[in-house]
Image (tube, rainbow, N blue to C red):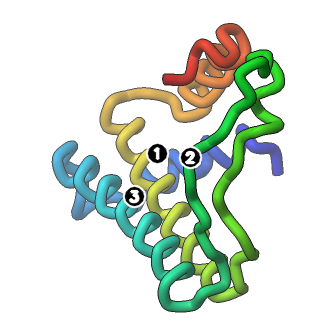
Amino acid sequence: MEDRNTRQELQETADKFLIRHKSILDTTSKMQEYCARVNRAIAKAVTCCGCIKIDADKQCLPPDANYSDIRAFMQSHLNGALCDNCRDTISHEIGTTVFYLAALCNLLELDLDTVINEEDERIRTLGIYSLK
């Protein structure tokens, strides 16, 4: 199945099944809740399971580094890999977040596919200057 069909189908599914949280306030707060649940699931993968570790410190860049070379010096601060359980949990929470994003697009009469394509085009056009 193409990505475009998947996004369109998700938006149709959200429209069909989102009944209880149809209010814009309910939808935005549910989306925020699931964003928080993604963060919590990541924290639990670190603190409860231990399948991943975070080893964060200041990002160090050589003073003479070109802007195009910076990527090579940046670190994710992640060590390890998600276990199957944590991967499933985080994937589920991200999926539900995307569901509420599709529902939000429906309420605002936006096409999720168009939103994604326009953002991709904006980033490709502006490159690193598009990111804040």
Q: Give me the residue at 40% from left, 58% from top.
A: 35
The amino acid sitting under disc 2 is Lys
Image depth: mark 1 or mark 2 in front:
2
Residue 4 pos. (x, y %): 72, 38
The amino acid sitting under disc 1 is Ala
Q: Earlier in the sequence, mark 1 or mark 2?
A: 2
Horizontal side of residue 96 vs 113, given as left or right? left
Q: How many marks?
A: 3
Q: CA distance from mark 1 to mark 3?
A: 14 Å
Q: Give me the residue at 69% from left, 15% from top.
A: 127
Q: Give me the residue at 61% from left, 66% from top.
A: 55
Residue at numbered disc 2: 58
Residue 111 pos. (x, y %): 51, 29
Q: Secondary structure at mark 2?
A: loop
Asked where in the image residue 97 lies, by quadrant, the reply is: bottom left
Image depth: mark 2 or mark 3 in front:
2
Q: Give me the residue at 77% from left, 38% from top.
A: 73
Q: Around disc 2, counting alpha carbons within 10 Å, would you say few (fewer than 14), some (14 to 19), or many (20 or more)?
A: few
Residue 128 pos. (x, y %): 66, 18
Residue at numbered disc 1: 102
The amino acid sitting under disc 3 is Cys
